[in-house]
């Protein structure tokens, strides 16, 4: 039996796909993936934790680094976390 993917794993998969895109569409893919992730959780604190899990998933795999894509992902996640922290 195959278990369904968690929202965090689904987001990681979509962001991973976006990292392979070489144009401005990568930013759009990141935003869509993070929007879906956030919509899977009701409480701001849950959303903050999920966003952190996505960022750590990429850092752990060594894919973020100091690349333009890595900086975009990190800044986008941090801004969203700050937004949810103000609402918590």
Image (cartoon, rainbow, N blue to C red):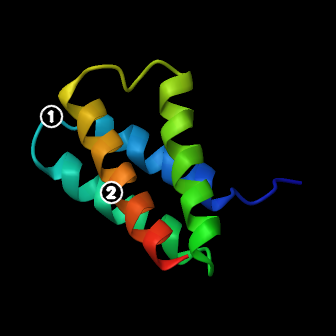
In the structure shown, which secondary structural element does the residue marked by tag 1 occupy? Answer: loop
Q: Quadrant of the N terminus?
A: bottom right
In this view of the protein, which residue sits in the foreground, 24 or 72?
72
> Residue farthest to the front?
86
Q: Where is residue 30 shown, x and y percent of the image?
A: 32, 53
Cα distance, mark 1 to mark 2? 23 Å
Q: Residue at the location (56% across, 35% down)?
A: 57
Q: Residue at the location (35% across, 20% down)?
A: 65
Q: Is residue 7 left or right of residue 75?
A: right
In this view of the protein, which residue sits in the foreground, 85 or 22?
85
Q: Where is residue 29 shown, x and y percent of the image?
A: 28, 55
Picture quadrant of residue 47 = bottom right
Pointer 1 residue? 22
Q: Where is residue 76 shown, x and y percent of the image?
A: 30, 52
In the structure shown, which secondary structural element does the residue marked by tag 2 occupy? Answer: helix
> Residue farthest to the right?
1
Report crowding for label 1: few under 14, some 14 to 19, many 20 or more residues within 10 A (C-alpha).
few
Q: Is residue 72 left or right of residue 8?
A: left
Q: Which label lies toward us, 1 or 2?
A: 2
Pointer 2 residue? 79
Picture quadrant of residue 16 = top left
Up/down of 42 relative to 62, above or below: below
Up/down of 15 relative to 59, above or below: below
In this view of the protein, which residue sits in the foreground, 49 or 25?
49
Nearest to N terminus: mark 1 or mark 2: 1
Report crowding for label 2: few under 14, some 14 to 19, many 20 or more residues within 10 A (C-alpha).
few
Could you tell me if residue 20 is visible in this image? no
Could you tell me if residue 51 is visible in this image? yes
């Amino acid at each position: 039996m195959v278990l369904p993917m968690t929202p965090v794993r689904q987001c990681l998969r979509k962001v991973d796909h976006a990292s392979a895109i070489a144009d401005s569409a990568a930013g759009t893919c990141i935003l869509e993936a993070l929007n879906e992730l956030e919509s899977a959780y009701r409480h701001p604190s849950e959303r903050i934790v999920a966003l952190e899990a996505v960022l750590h998933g990429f850092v752990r795999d060594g894919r973020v680094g100091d690349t333009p894509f890595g900086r975009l992902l990190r800044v986008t996640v941090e801004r969203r976390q700050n937004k949810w922290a103000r609402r918590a």
